[in-house]
Amino acid sequence: MDIFSRRRQQLVEILKSTSVSQLHKASGVAASSISSCLKQLPDGRYLRNIGEVTARKLERGAKKPEGWLDGLVSQDGASTPYKPSITTEYAVDWIGAALEKMNDQERRDVAAIFSLYATYLRDTTKADLIAAIDQKPAPEILKKA
């Protein structure tokens, strides 16, 4: 399942407890945009994907923790990240979607972040990782992460 399918699936879960109109008011995402994310075309594609910015707005509007639409935090809304069993395809789609929006320098900076993340992956929290980035000589963008 790619990142957009996962977000769409999670959006359906949100809409089981609220309406498109209420989610629009709470998130600031146009009701027509929310509906477009769920409208499937005859060829099986969807009219619109849920991008990174829209996903974060929808999460805030639905009072879900950041990353919930991506499946990066538990289903009950707890902010403690869990380690999902994801496929390589899912990971590549998720990362690829973000990298497509970046310029060459940003891609190099992200590669540096991944390198640091891999070093700390097993025994770290997001806060610990950010602290490690701040302590090492790194491009300015890494210090803003």
Image: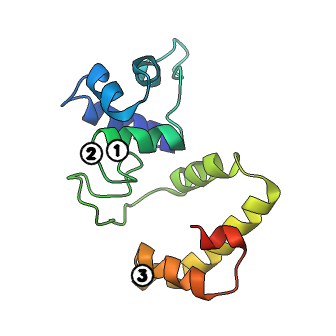
Looking at the rendered image, the quarter that the C terminus falls into is bottom right
Q: Position of residue 12 (x, y in %)?
A: 31, 31
Are circles 2 and 1 on residues that touch, CB within 8 Å? Answer: yes
Q: Earlier in the sequence, mark 3 or mark 2?
A: 2
Q: Earlier in the sequence, mark 3 or mark 1?
A: 1
* Residue at left offset 51%, top offset 14%: 41
Query: Is residue 26 or residue 17 the one in the foreground?
Result: 26
Give SS at disc 1. helix
- Identified by mark 2, the residue type is Lys
Give me the C-alpha separation between circle 2 and circle 1. 5 Å
Counting other residues with Cα less than 10 Å from the Cα at mark 3, is it few (<14), some (14-19), or many (20 or more)? few
Q: Which residue is mark 2?
A: 63
User: Residue under circle 3?
Assistant: 124
Residue type marked 1: Arg
Look at the numbered disc 3 and give the secondary structure of its residue. Answer: loop
Answer left or right for 34 relative to 113: left
